[in-house]
Amino acid sequence: MTQPSRGGEYDVAVIGGGLVGSALAWGLARSGQKVAMLDEGDIAVRPSRGNFALVWVQGKGLGMAEYAGWTKQSSDDWSGFADLLREQTGLDVAYRRPGGFMPMLSEEELQARANTMMRLHNQPDMIPYPYEVMDRETLRKELPFIGPDVVGGTYCPLDGHCNSLRLLRTLHKGIGMLGVDYRPNHRVESIEHRDGGFRMTTAGGEIRAGKVVLAAGHDSARLAPMVGLSAPVRPQRGHVIVTEKTAPFLHHPTVYVRQTDEGGVMIGDSFEETGFDTTLQPGISSAIAQRAIRFFPLLGKLNVVRSWAALRVLTPDGFPIYEESKTAPGAFVATCHSGVTLAANHALTLAPLIAAGGLGDRFAPFSARRFHVPQAA
Amino acid sequence: MSAFDFDIAVVGAGPAGLAAAALAASKGASVVLLDEQAEPGGQIYRAVTETPVRDRKVLGPDYWHGAELLGPLRDSGAAHWPGSTVWSVARPREDGPDGQRRIQIGLSRNGAAALLTVRHVILATGALERPFPIPGWTLPGVLGAGAAQVLLKTSGLVPSGATVMAGSGPLLWLLAWQYLQAGARIDAILDTTPKENWRAALPLLPGFLRSPYLGKGMKLMLEVRRKLTVIGNVTALRAEGGLAGEGVLKSVVYTRNGTEHRLPADTLLLHHGVIPNLNLANATGCAQRWDEQQRCWRPTTDEWGATSVEGVSLAGDGAGIGGARAAEEAGRLTALDALHRLGRIGREQRDHSAAPFRAALDRALTGRAFLDTLYTPAEAFRVPADDTIVCRCEEITAGAVREAVRLGCSGPNQAKSFLRCGMGPCQGRLCGPTVTEVIAAERGVSPAEVGYYRLRPPVKPITLAELAALPKTDADIDAVFKH
Amino acid sequence: MFRRLPEIETAAEKVSFTIDGRPASARAGDSVAAALLANGVTACRNTPVSGAARGPYCMMGVCFDCLVTIDGTGNRQGCQVRVAPGMAAETQNGKREVER
């Protein structure tokens, strides 16, 4: 695994071994492509290891109806995706879709949220999906442990969650079984478009491929211009707290608190513009903890056993970039901050399109050119 | 209103912490000694203020030396906060209003979490026993020799029933000797010291002949060998439970010269030396390095104990194993350096005051290399077979770690995310060294190249309610609520 | 299996507490983990992952194998808590329950 590459020829090189890269590599290999997946080493930024594991639909896509539709599609395909992974590898990624909640701590918040959801659904080209604005009484029937400060919330039956670390491991096992050449410690230094293909200079030697897919998270910003693409992403930090394993009591994911299949309760999150610094701030962890206790007072007694801060990969509007290069055809970029939710799409829809040769018009709204167009007044 | 609660916080009330706090406070710095135990002494001098084992011949003179560290602490004026568990040490994003560096300590005391702001931190967090992964080591009835020694010191408890001790290293012999003095029954000591180690250690013998350990160590070991059954050259071990899932230890199987033997056992005490307890240093961001001679990870420090994080120093076994007497002297040296860094004493005064402590430290470390080499555990005990649990918390086997390497995990952090090893409450204290060595052996590279878990606070559990009650700035609240 | 040294037994300041509801006796200054071992209890819990029996291993607060429920609160490290009169110590079965 750490031997220098001997410069084999691949159909596709996927740059990035996180959730986006490995879902794409899996899908590409299933489509018959000969794939190399190039990754960094043991210590790297890796938001794929630090996320909240939600497979979430509600509230997404205000400002881009196509993103709401793309998200819903992935959520609808997720169960089948999990089944395919389990049949292939024997590993269960614990996908559940019991519906999810966003509880609110004030009437103003609840009203603002209801308005947002309405505006979202009133967008042109919006494919509607079911959701409910619940008052406190209705919410309490579904979430009996909800605290006295909770005034209500929104619910969407399409929301769910999985074990995202197991998802990453399962994808890695699956791509190995499909013959993908996984190369850790192969950080890409440069990419050259020549002779109808791509030559990558990496920390482990040279790699050549007919196509290249940039799924490198934060590093896509650096790599994209090398192949005539643009991926203007920035890091945005979020803190997460995990408790000790607890007997199951929270059967629905909520946007800030969810219980994993292992029993630990995950609690998030925050939005901080701090560059690449992942140092924990006790005050932020404290605010997150305090909010979680307002939602579910009985969480107060549980012990926090782990905590981290991870860096979302954020585009200027928060929506993904999917694009093929015009000046270097065969080079693609795929970046998003919902690598868990969109994993099914990446594996089952996007990868086959890349394998077949092009994304098509459907993905025009996801092009990075949208960042260079002046906003309509 | 001062921005600082204290000048110096010392974490850990073992020999290094006691000596450091006493010296720093006696020179006029405001010092707080934070320790999670109710009484000082750390592990090596555990219960020295209150042990029920009053007959001094049982625990021995080295143990009772610990009591001599208490008077200087009391007289120094240092604040001593027992029952305080430190779960985080960090530099806040902004320096204080006077532009001076601040270090923030998260601690938990009487069920409430608090943040202390100090100018300098001395970590004296000591050591823990090296993991000793053998099949069945998770069975009730299997304990570390250090654990058994704690039971003796704190509660006057000794093993009853069939008792086997296994491993190598000075603590094993010391405990066996203490049991002899106390009249406890030990059925056998299974000595796993590899034959080859004697050859490797021989060139270091001259140094050991000048060591303070030589005299007492030899006397102790000879008495144990004379009075107890010692079986040498043990190359493999496993612990077995009862049939029909009784779930507790029933017997120990050892291999010697290729032959297996079974001993009935109600208690198995394992020991393969001690290694630095480095979780707090790691979570604070202190750089670590692999020490090939001691075959363990240790935070990187200079000769004064300064780590790679400005304002954080380390003294004692937490910086590298040297034993209790060395820890004391290192604590004093680190305290002097801290005083110097805080501008309280000049460089020349620091160096002048340090001279006798440095000489004593050198004397205390004489012969260390010989012991380290002689007592390096055999590879079979550091890189166990596939079916052996390596992560006790999440019950992950060595075989699962090897499979993760074949899947492409090149280091313990990727392995952790794939397998959950290191994600339990012990935060890798009992699996980290093994996971690193298993990955290294599978990849054919050195442990130094593989690396170690990257840890984050809290390094000890705190409740969500405690965390929720900590002070928050407006910026903290905005980061969470305004989106 | 552990026993108290005889000279300590006679001088002991006894503390009465319960183990899974059964009356038991320890010495003032014992940790709960030590008190369980002194009372012949070798296994103090079953793990949340596989249900395997576990008992104290390190006695210094780093292994987290001595987890027990004390006075209704689960996942307490028995070696870090001193036994007190009337204390209720219980074997911890699997995952901690959220209400205790």
Image (spheres, coloured by chain):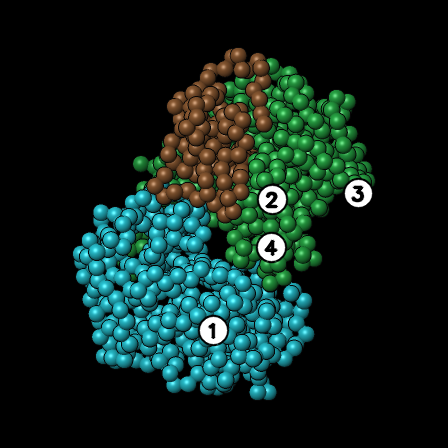
Chain colours: A cyan, B green, C brown
Q: Name the side, left or right, on which A133 lies relative to B204.
A: left
Dot 1 amino acid type: Ala
Pinpoint the chain carrying mark 1. A
Q: Secondary structure at mark 1?
A: helix
Q: Where is mark 4, residue-wise?
A: B400
- Of circles 1 and 3, the one toward us is 3
Identify residue type, mark 2: Arg
Using the image as rendered, state which of residue A123 and residue B128 is in the foreground: A123
User: Sequence-wise, which precedes: disc 2 or disc 4?
Assistant: 2
* Chain of the residue on which disc 2 is drawn: B
Give amino acid for label 4: Ala
Considering only vertical position in the picture, is B329 above or below B255? above
Q: Is residue A311 at least partly visible in the picture?
A: no
Residue A38: percent from the left, percent from the top? 57, 70
Mark 4: which secondary structure? helix
Q: CA distance from mark 2 to mark 4?
A: 26 Å
| Cα gap from disc 2 to disc 3, whole angstroms | 35 Å
The Cα atoms of the two marked residues, 4 and 3, are separated by: 27 Å
Of badges 2 and 4, the one in the foreground is 4
Asked if labels 1 and 3 share a chain, the reply is no
Chain letter for mark 4, please. B
* x 35%, y 77%: residue: A371
Residue identifier under label 3:
B258
Distance from Cα at disc 1 to Cα at disc 4: 26 Å
